[in-house]
Amino acid sequence: MLIDTHCHLDFPTFDGWRDQVIERARRAGVGAIVVPGVSARYWARVLELCGSATDAVHLYPALGMHPYFMQEHRSEHLSLLKRQVEKYRERLVAIGEIGLDFQLEHYDETAQTELLVEQLKIAKAAELPVLLHVRKAHDQVLKQLRRLNLPRGGIVHAFSGSEQQAQEYVKLGFKLGFGGAVTYERATKLRRFAQQFPLGWIVLETDAPDMPLSGWRDQPNEPFRVAEVAQTLTDLRQIELNDLIAQTADNACALLSLTCCKSSR
Ligand SMILES: [Zn+2]
């Protein structure tokens, strides 16, 4: 079973054709999709979407406040997040998408860091893993993770750091998300990591509708393309596709305690 550990299936891009997107994913062998919430106004939508799922493709919600939407976030959203996490604790698989993005124009390092730390504390109290978005800020994120010592780690989505930073994340219980970026031949560093990192470190993702794969830049990305990400990693590592799919699914299942894993394997 393929697992897309990071897909914004709730985004309006998919309105009107979401069922087709899910059906195409199912036919490509995708058994589960993790849907991270990015801002308070989307949380209800994420929960509703994931609650309406059929057994064919399991949809798992996560809730969080993304650094990209700093202007939208309010301090009261943190207390709302706490209440939502208490209420939906059994359904949520993680807190996310949260993180630091120092690649954004005019970013406010202090505001981003405060918001991240508060959300990490919520994850720690609820004993949930986190889904991290990190750009040009891996050392700063690692510093907070070391300080807070989360019980269940998480996933560094669309990993873009160094080999040493990868090792640090893994030591702290994290997996590294590989998605469409690895399908670009010019992504030499990332492709080398995809070859060399132990398979136990890696989970698959698409970040759909964002992060189009090589050759598909003119249309929204879709979760079925996680199959192509798996194929690229398989080619790079020269292993059996089924072994790669099984091991990365195991990684995601163990980390996120996905309910579908026991029944389907
Ligand atoms: Zn995302």
Image: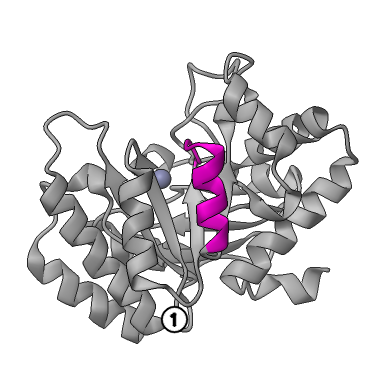
**Furthest residue to the front?**
164
Q: Is residue 30 magenta?
A: no
Residue shown at 25% from the left, 59% from the top: 116
- Residue on which disc 1 sits: 127
User: Which SS class for mark 1?
Assistant: loop
- Left or right placement of residue 250 versus residue 239 in this view: left
Q: Which secondary structure class fits the magenta region best?
A: helix
Compare residues 48 and 201 and report the one nearer the observer: 201
Q: Nearer the viewer, residue 137 or 146?
A: 146
For the point 67% across and 28% down, the residue is 192
The answer to whether 186 is drawn above or below residue 150 in the figure is above
Whether 149 is drawn above or below 105: the answer is: below
Residue 72 visible in rendering: no
**Quarter, ligand 1:** top left
Quadrant of the image containing the C terminus: bottom right
The image's colour scheme reads one colour
Image x and y of residue 18, in percent: 50, 46
Q: Is residue 11 left or right of residue 177?
A: left
Which residue type does callout 1 highlight?
A: Glu
Residues in magenta, as a range: 158-171
Quadrant of res 251: bottom right
Quadrant in which residue 57 is drawn: bottom right
